[in-house]
Amino acid sequence: MKEYIEERAMEIANYIIETNATVRQAAKKFGVSKSTVHKDVVERLPQFNFALAQSARKVLDINKSERHIRGGLATREKYLHIEQR
């Protein structure tokens, strides 16, 4: 694997762990796609830093389990703004 990919994967994982970021937030921060973030953290990172990959995966799993709540809150906010007009 190319060195810059390993570095990117480690940077993304550290960012996710430090900020509890979602895949979308990490993708936006690093200027890559959501699928690249997911592939870096889930497939590539365990090959050379398993412990870091596990930590990042825990955060991603928590975010995934909470996303239906965030989606509901976003919808609620949307309709609250519409009603206020």
Image (spheres, grey):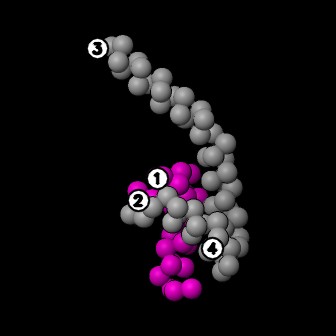
| Magenta stretch, residue numbers | 1-30
* Image spot of residue 83 (x, y percent): 36, 13
Q: Which mark is residue 29?
A: 2
* Prevailing secondary structure class for the magenta stretch in the rendered image: helix
**Distance between the alpha carbons at the discs numbered 4 and 1:** 18 Å
- Residue beneath disc 1: 25
Three-letter residue code for mark 1: Gln
Residue 67 appears in which quarter of the rendering? Answer: top right
- Residue beneath disc 3: 85
**Distance between the alpha carbons at the discs numbered 4 and 3:** 48 Å
* Image spot of residue 29 (x, y percent): 41, 59
Asked which secondary structure carries label 3, the reply is: loop
Asked which secondary structure carries label 4, the reply is: helix
Residue at the farthest bottom position: 2
- Residue beneath disc 4: 45
* Image spot of residue 2 (x, y percent): 51, 86
85 is higher (above) or lower (below) than 7: above
**Distance between the alpha carbons at the discs numbered 2 and 1:** 6 Å
The residue located at (54%, 79%) in the rendering is 6
Residue at the farthest front position: 35
Asked which secondary structure carries label 2, the reply is: helix
